[in-house]
Structure formats: C-alpha cells, structure tokens
Image: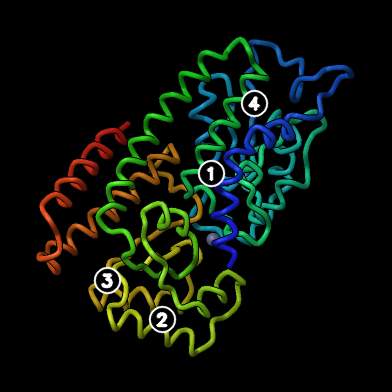
Amino acid sequence: MKKAHLLRTLVAAVAALAVGAAVAGCGGSSAGEPTTGTTTTESSDPITLVASLNQWGSLAAAIGGDYVDVTSILSSTSVDAHDFEPTTADVAKLEKADVVLVNGAGYDTWADKTLASGATRISVADTVGAIDGDNPHLWFSKDARDAVAKALLETFTKLRPDAKDTFQTNYDAWQQKETTLDETMSSFADAYSGDKYAATESIAYYLMSDLGLSDATPTGFAQAMSNESEPAASDIKAFQDLLNDKGVELLVNNSQEENDTTKELVSLAETNGIDVLEVTEQMPSDYVNLTDWVTALVNEVVSDFKDGQASGDEASASATTDEGTASASSSASASSSD
Ligand SMILES: [Zn+2]
C-alpha cells in the first residue's frame, strides 16, 4: 500500500531534512555565490514568497513575519484543487518570487513549471520524502508541518541573516502552538487509539493517523477515489453497509471534492447517527494559520468522540480518559484564539 510506504518515508525523511534544504538552496544568480536564491536582496526589501497553496503560505507567513511577503495561489475552498490550472497572472507571480513553496507529490505540478533563475524552491514532499503516488494531503501531517517550518526557517535565515533572531522567535512561537496541538492529539490517541473512521476521500489520512484512528473505508472505494474514477456499485454498497452497521465512529467528508455519491454517504451517516467531519483541501478563509485550522478540526473530533462516549458507551469511558481529553481540548482552544 502507498500509505505504509509513505509512513516509512515520513519517518526517514525528517532525518533527511538537511539534505532537502541543501538541494532547495542551490542556484545562486551570480557566480561564486554559495548562498541561496537572489543573493542581493537589500535588507529593507521583504523576501517575496509564492506558495501554491494557502495553507502552506500561512505557515511561511507565520515564520517570516514582516520580512516575508507571502502570496498564495490556491486559496479558495470551492475550486477542484486536484485539477487546478493556473492563470497567466498566477504564473507571473511564480516567475517573480524569491522563494516558491510547493506541496509536491503530484498535487500541484503546475507550480513547478516556472521557477526564476536564482529562486529558491521548497517542496513539502521533498522535506518528508513523499513522491508522486503517495497521499499528497501533507499539510495534515504533523511531521510534514514540522519539516516545512524548519526548511522555511533555514531558507529565510540564509536569505536575510540580519533577521535571524526574528525568524527564530517566530518559529519558536509557531512550534509552541504545534506542541499544544500535538499534546491534544496524543491524549486523544491514548483514549481512542484503533477506533475506526471511513472517508469519502483520503484527504485527512495523516490527521486521522496522528490521532491514532484506523481507516475502515472499503478498499475498492478508497482506490477509486484516489484514482479519481467512479467507484463500482459493489464498493458503494460496501460503504453503505459499513455505515448502516455503524461500523465506524466518524465519517470524514471532503466537501471541496463532493459528488452525488459522497453526498448520499454523508446523509446515510447522519441517518445512522455517525458524526461527519467536513474537511476542505484548502484552508477556509476564517483561519489565518494552518495550525489553528488543524487544531479546530482536531477539537471537533475530540468533542464528537466525547459526545459519542457520553451518549453511547458510558461504561467504557473511564473518568481518567474524560479528564485527559477535556484538559487537552481546553488548552488547545485557549491557544488557538488570535
Ligand atoms: Zn484531495
């Protein structure tokens, strides 16, 4: 399975981060310059960074602060992200950037077609060793967020050494938020590890994995969705049976890529009292920061499972479990306020 492959590469590639950053840093515009990118950026000019996706752009803005001018190309939750075509204006932005931040893993190959000479390219997929064919929804992986934040810190520091301390301070603040999120996910995983979910598309695979949940999506259906083909009637039937049997605690629905089949599955889940987590490809406009968005999704899962325990399985919900998730959830929501 692709998933097993990527989990291995995720682990291996965090260690390989330094290599990825070094590759991203090649291509100085003037001879003999070992440093990254446009080497003559005046100290008063912000670094211009163009991100293919708004969720990664938000992470670049968090680390770069006032020293980095971030533009994100895909930022709407109502376009088909997997089949996006950039406009000529989008291409022009990419061509002028000092730093281009792409997701990779086949998700946004359009963003890789134009790179100014001397520009620095950071590929999320490269930082974690993901390749085409792996699950590309890397922003939901804590390992990928962590690797990209480090790559951004290194790149910005190379381009603007005078702002080194600011980048480090911004990185530390981001890291603190991410650590709080990580603690919430760990205490959830302690309580609910192995519980099952199903998904209309594999969008939240890494997030569910970080939460310790187990993917029970019928295999044929999952394969059809990842190939962007129509699932067979028998695959849809298997999914319907799963929901009717209440074989999962949660249905993850990609509301940015929905169709008649997924809409029917959502309403079937609702009929059966199964909670539905709506997830989009891009970060919705009510968030300014990737970690806040992921935290909100995690808090929703935590509260769905706690409600499920309270109404259904009181006997199996121990007092310690309830206290653990309650304190983790409240500390996460406190830190996610702006
Ligand atoms: Zn997707």
In this picture, residue 19 sits left or right of residue 168: right
Q: Which residue is mark 1?
A: 144
Badge 3 element: loop
Task: Please tell me in which quadrant of the rendered image residue 57 appears.
Answer: top right
| First of labels 4, 3 by sequence position | 4
Q: Which residue is mark 3?
A: 274
The residue positioned 63% from the left and 11% from the top of the image is 44
Task: Please tell me in which quadrant of the rendered image residue 295 appears.
Answer: top left
Q: Which mark is residue 239?
A: 2
Q: Which residue is mark 4?
A: 155
- Which residue is nearer to you in this view: 266 or 208? 208
Q: Within 10 angstroms of label 2, few (less than 14), some, or many (20 or more) residues?
A: many
Q: Determine the residue located farthest toward the right in the rendered image.
A: 31
Labelled pair 4, 3 in contact (Cβ < 8 Å): no
| First of labels 2, 3 by sequence position | 2
| As drawn, 77 above or below 168 | below
Spot occupied by residue 75 in the image (x, y as percentages of width and height): 53, 47
| As drawn, 53 above or below 2 | above
Spot occupied by residue 174 in the image (x, y as percentages of width and height): 43, 29
The residue positioned 84% from the left and 23% from the top of the image is 29
Which is more foreground, mark 1 or mark 3? 1
Asked whether mark 1 lies closer than 8 Å to ligand 1, one says no
Q: Within 10 angstroms of label 3, few (less than 14), some, or many (20 or more) residues?
A: many
- Which residue is nearer to you in this view: 196 or 5? 5
Spot occupied by residue 56 in the image (x, y as percentages of width and height): 54, 41
